Image (tube, coloured by chain):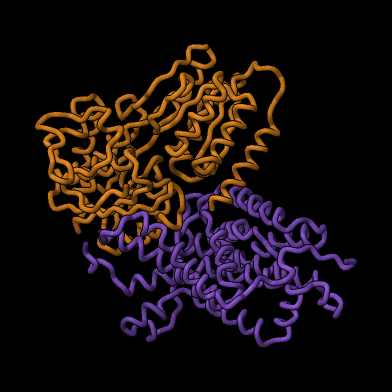
Chain colours: A orange, B purple
Amino acid sequence: MKFGKLLAGAVLALGVGGAAYADGHEKTKVGFVYVGPVGDGGWTYEHDQGRLAVEAEFGDKVETVFVENVAEGPDSERVMTQMALDGADLIFTTSFGYMDPTNNVAAKFPDVKFEHATGYKRLHPNVSTYSARFYEGRAIQGHIAGNMTKSNIIGYIGSFPIPEVIRGINSAYIHAAKVNPDVEFKVIWVYTWFDPAKEADAAKVLIEQGADVVLQHTDSTAPQAAAQEAGNVVTFGQASDMGQYAPFPRVSSIIDDWAPYYIERTRAVMEGTWEQKDTWDGIGPGMVGIGEISDAVPADVKAEALALKTALADGSYHAFTGPLNKQDGSPFLAEGETADDGTLAGMNFYVEGIEGEIPQ
Amino acid sequence: MDLSAINPILLIAAMIAAATPILLAAIGELVVERAGVLNLGVEGMMITGAVCGFIIAVNTGSPALGFIAAAVGGAVLSLLFAFLTQVALANQVASGLALTLFGLGLSALMGQSYVGIKPPRTEATPLGALADIPVIGPIVFGHDLLVYLGLAIVAGTWATLTFTRAGLVLRAVGENHDAAHALGYKVKRIRTAAIMFGGACAGLGGAYISLVRVPQWTEGMTAGVGWIALALVVFASWKPWRVLLGAYLFGGITQLQLNLQGAGVAIPVEYLAMSPYIVTIIVLVILSADKSRAPGSLGRTFHASS
């Protein structure tokens, strides 16, 4: 698989190279590196929507290129290098595993601006990081899930055990347990962002083991299809609305809206005002959207969920508010205390109540 | 830990279903390699089969027609490889890789308007009372036709290669194409037929993913199964029954590790996640201690003048 992706990446990069232009630099060239195909219906799809929004905003003044299915690791470094050599002014690298490659390539091309999604390393002045507070959306999902489950077993398909995913699990659990103290989380790690067959298998296993709500932190719609097949299982769209599975099994969704950020950063490059920064926006600024809550959710639960959304958006409520303990029982947050961004960014523990261990 | 959450009957049934795409692709590739051709385009043919099968099944409402279309689609794509390697005498490795890339791109193009559509349901084979037998019923008799077809293809391939004249000729072409040519066998024609058989099997395997296992169409949805099938053929020392064993081991342990994770077994997840690969390789390497070797002409270009 790696080999296939490698070659796909390499050849696509060559294709991009072949299409390189030599007409000076009147256009701003923006590159995008994707971990999955643009048609995944989830994560990469939304990034590509952001790319299209940049094109729509600036028209002829901008040229965008993208390479999809780029494996995390050395392959991505080659793809980024090729993009930079081809004259890209700004490159968005849109997966956590591109963190070190992005910084490595940025060191070699100080005049090219790099934007790395969901990472935390900014080793060079030309590297910015950006991410969305998906955990705010997870809080709403947890609230709905805790109310909807009848078996009290909620399945969770994890991709990789990184802080971003663990944050989501914790946030969903906290809010599910708040409305339903008997709720139990079953987490399966699939070690991939995109593999529909494996995601479907994981969803089926969770359903066979009694889960009647399945949350996913992977990119394809395969778990939605598995839930639809099972008939009585609730799911949530991940990264994209996945509205084709509404109103049931998909009862709501987290939608990543990258377009405003991509437009803003492209404009900054055009105007020469680009500066390194770390962006982490949530529901309030609109980077995280909540897809329509369908009628399969009881009206009172829906109203509560929307109230929660409002509170998260205006900052009157934080998804990680004490009192909370860590899984081992040691105190995490005192009564009324909220988690700071540093703690959230490096979160590597479950909160009290979740069973199982995080792979280290 | 709660092992009682795992239902062994459902687990074994799921294992058989999970193994089927790999099995189909691998048995097809086995025939191709026994004919002396190394086709690295399995992934491309699978994904093309997946999208062809999906499109036809959705438009006709018949999964059976979908599977036929998948086999045809895979075989037609493999003809491209046959043309490149048998007529144009291109390098097989490069042509195979090109086929994979081409297949991935072509399928993405063909499937654009089929994202998010639900295919018609593939029903279990109506075996009547057999499926109602406790335990054995759901495990052995509760599957769709493709599962049995996969087994039949393995048995048929084994019987053909071992007992028939056609199998002997195919193996002769794969072991030493010059000798086979000298005996008057049509090396290119036989190889082209084998390549098409491999393409059809890979297409079926791909359609099994898009029509049964997931079931939906997503770009790149085979996600590397073709490469696993390729590796399986080598580790199975080009023997049909070992391919079956390897595919079931791989599919089975993949399912088992997901189940164990769900049940909260205290084995580090990393070990569980790598276990399908490790166990399959270890078992097949031990089995291949009998000095099995690759077909003599594997990957070599044949021209009648040489």
Tell me: residue A100, above or below residue B277.
above
Counting every numbered tag in the picture gives 0
Residue ID at (36%, 81%): B137
Comparing B303 with B105, the one in front is B303
Q: Is residue A18 left or right of residue A204?
A: right
**Percent x, y for residue A234?**
29, 52
Q: Is residue B59 visible?
A: no
In the image, farthest residue toward the right? B305
Q: Name the residue rendered at 48%, 12% in the picture.
A: A273
Give the vertical position of B200 relative to A80 (above or below).
below
Q: Is residue B231 visible?
A: yes
Name the quarter where the C terminus of chain B is drawn: bottom right
Q: Quadrant of the N terminus of chain B?
A: bottom left
For this view, does B191 lie left or right of residue A189? right
Q: Position of residue B6 (x, y in %)?
A: 28, 68
Q: Residue at x 39, y 85 (%)?
A: B130
Q: Residue furthest left?
A: A335
Front residue of this view, candidates A19 and A81 = A81
Residue at the image point whose x is 56% and y is 18% from the top? A111
To which quarter of the image does residue B206 belong? bottom right
